[in-house]
């Protein structure tokens, strides 16, 4: 009887410690994911604005093509996670949304249509897959005025030519101010 009670107590303590470890893992992910999103957004915007000041919107296309992937890789390494950008209408096929991301982006569209502020559109959860468990987070990217020269409904010919040169299968046009341009997407494998 005493052994059974001790075994039950040990199992309960193990379960509680596991739950605390998972809470700690989730809190660390939340903190790191938010910091990584902020850093990527700030760095990318700074690079795009510098390119636009130097060579106009056509030059900004090259920033997205050449600099954005290396920024994402550098920030991913810094925080020990994987960060990128995706959209329901991607410019770069390498950024195509997976099923989970597509579902979240569609939910963002519904939330925006219901009146929720685009700046509040964030979602996170633990996802289990065949390859293991992950923490995942997404944060919507709003379409600002500066975005419209490359992602709007009317794109000037020199910009369009540059886009077509880098992205022949581009789908990322037709946006208007305040649309969800896409989202930052972050994931980290959960190590047991």
Image: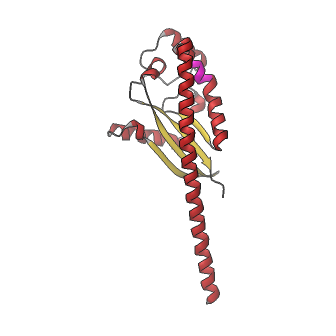
- Residue at far left of view: 115
User: x, y percentage for residue 38?
Assistant: 53, 37
Label tally: 0
User: x, y percentage for residue 73?
Assistant: 65, 34
Q: Is residue 91 above or below residue 119?
A: above
Say which residue appears at 62% left-offset and 33% top-offset. Answer: 72
- Residue at far top of view: 157
Give the residues drawn in magenta, as a range.
61-65
Please give left or right for residue 160 compared with residue 121 in the image.
right
Q: Main secondary structure of the magenta part?
A: helix
Image quadrant holding the C terminus, namely bottom right
User: x, y percentage for residue 133?
Assistant: 60, 53
In the image, 115 versus 51, the foreground residue is 51
Q: Is residue 62 magenta?
A: yes
Image quadrant holding the N terminus, namely bottom right
User: x, y percentage for residue 86?
Assistant: 53, 34
Q: Is residue 96 visible from the viewing direction of this image?
A: no
Q: Is residue 59 above or below residue 175?
A: above
- Residue at far bottom of view: 1
- Color theme of the render: secondary structure
Q: Is residue 162 visible from the viewing direction of this image?
A: yes
Q: Is residue 123 magenta?
A: no
Say which residue appears at 46% left-offset and 22% top-offset. Answer: 147
In the image, 21 versus 175, the foreground residue is 21
Q: Is residue 30 above or below residue 177?
A: below
Please give left or right for residue 135 compared with residue 89 in the image.
right
């Amino acid at each position: 009887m005493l052994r059974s009670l001790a075994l039950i107590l040990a199992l309960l303590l193990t379960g509680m410690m596991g739950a605390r470890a998972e809470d700690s893992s989730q809190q660390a992910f939340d903190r790191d994911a938010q910091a990584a999103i902020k850093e990527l957004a700030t760095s990318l915007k700074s690079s795009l604005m510098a390119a636009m000041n130097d060579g106009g919107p056509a030059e900004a296309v090259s920033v997205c093509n050449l600099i954005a992937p290396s920024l994402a890789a550098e920030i991913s390494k810094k925080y020990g996670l994987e960060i990128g950008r995706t959209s329901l209408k991607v410019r770069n096929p390498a950024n195509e949304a997976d099923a989970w991301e597509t579902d979240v982006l569609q939910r963002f569209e519904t939330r925006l249509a219901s009146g929720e502020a685009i700046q509040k559109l964030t979602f996170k959860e633990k996802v289990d897959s065949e390859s293991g468990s992950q923490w995942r987070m997404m944060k919507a990217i709003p379409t600002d005025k500066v975005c419209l020269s490359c992602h709007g409904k009317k794109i000037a010919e020199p910009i369009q030519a540059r886009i077509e040169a880098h992205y022949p299968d581009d789908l990322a046009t037709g946006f208007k101010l305040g649309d969800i341009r896409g989202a930052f997407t972050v994931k980290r494998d959960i190590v047991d």
